[in-house]
Image (spheres, rainbow, N blue to C red):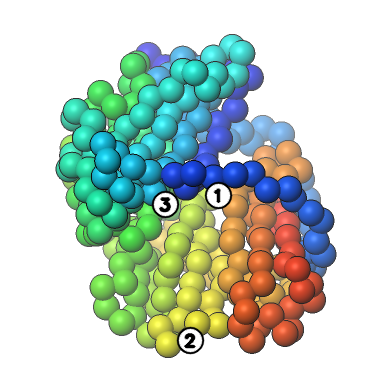
Amino acid sequence: MPTSRLRTASAVFVTLAATATAAPVTAAPAFSGTAVAAAPSSVVRQPVDFNGDGYEDMVASVPDGTVSGIKKAGYVVVHPGDAKGINPARHQVINQNTPGVPGSASANARFGGSAPADIDADGYTDLLVSAGNGRPVILFGGKSGLGTRAAEFQGHGQSQGEAVGDFDGDGRADVAGIDNAEWAGKIVLSENIGADGSVGNTRTALTADGVTTYEGVQAADINNDGKGDLLVTTGCNDEPDCGGTPLYLSTGTGFTHTPIVTAPGTYLNHASVTVGSVNGDAYPDLVLTRQPTGLDSDVDFPSKGGAVAVALGGPN
């Protein structure tokens, strides 16, 4: 059975290109924002532990990776943690040619986008992996880690971006997925997920207005109320210089739009968002980065070289 102790190794989730080089980071003016009060010290995030040994593990997504000569087939690399941290020499590569994983590696499938959570509530962290135009795959954790048991996720349809969280606060993992099959896109929640990937219930969480499109979704309990919130990346059907990163706080039965920072919304256009802890107060924080786009919105942007913003999570 998995243990409850949490050791020194920390979980890291990264998305990699097939080949990549590190670049130096330079300071840039941040957007304005509002600080919030610290969270209670009793609030503890859930560790990512695929094999239940009490040490956090690391997974890297490589959706553009080559598998057996097949370009952009994609894979994930799992590094188990131990008492000394993460050892790069110890790793496991999982792709759609791995025995037991549904599907087969194919060109441009881009298998690899991943979201960790204990989906089947057995105490081991599982991994929901997107698979391009196919259905996502659930890699279930266990005593031997990932890869011994897997199932095709039977939720909202083709994989267009997924996030895992407990959006209704019932203690079970749910999946939020993007569905842009129609002109007005939707974000659909899949609830009561079974060990075979089946879904007991689906409901529409958000519906676009016919102009806005949904391009990405992340989940985090920003205000630590026990319900997962949605951070959505948006664009527009007919306008390239459009879009943003709205935050929707869960009410348990629906979602309420909540501004992220106090700066004009145009500053958030074309921003990439990462969720993590910046100040260690147990509330998830948002780090937004924006690079020049060559579009008209660059004219109004205060920093011509791009900028980084930190929006601190809090009770409100």
How far apart marks 1 and 2 lie (CA) works out to 31 Å
Q: Closer to the observer: label 1 or label 3?
A: 3
Please count the marks in the image. 3
- Mark 2 or 3, closer to the camera: 2
Look at the numbered disc 2 and give the secondary structure of its residue.
loop
Q: Secondary structure at mark 1?
A: loop
- SS assignment at label 3: strand
Q: Are marks 1 and 2 in contact (CB under 8 Å)?
A: no
Measured Cα–Cα span from mark 1 to mark 3: 12 Å
**Callout 2 crowding tier (Cα within 10 Å): few <14, some 14–19, many ≥20:** few
Query: Circle 2 sits on which residue?
Result: 239
Q: CA distance from mark 2 to mark 3?
A: 26 Å
- Give the amino acid at mark 3: Ala
- Mark identifier at residue 163: 3
Query: Is 144 situated left or right of 23 in this image?
Result: left
**Residue 198 in the image: above or below residue 296:** above
Kind of residue indicated by mark 1: Asp
Name the side, left or right, on which 9 lies relative to 261.
Answer: left
Q: Which mark is residue 189?
A: none
Left or right: where does residue 101 sit relative to residue 76?
A: left
- Residue 246 in the image: x percent, y percent? 56, 69
Look at the image and tell me whether residue 264 can be seen. Answer: no
Question: Which amino acid type is marked by label 2?
Answer: Glu
Category of crowding for the residue at label 1, using alpha-carbon neighbours closer than 10 angstroms: few (below 14), some (14–19), many (at least 20)? many
Q: State the residue position of label 1.
A: 221
Number of the front mark, 1 or 2: 2
First of labels 1, 2 by sequence position: 1
Q: Residue at position x 79%, y 54% from top? A: 26
Tag 1–tag 3 contact (CB < 8 Å): no
The x and y percentages for residue 313 are: 68, 53
- As displayed, is residue 68 above or below residue 207? above
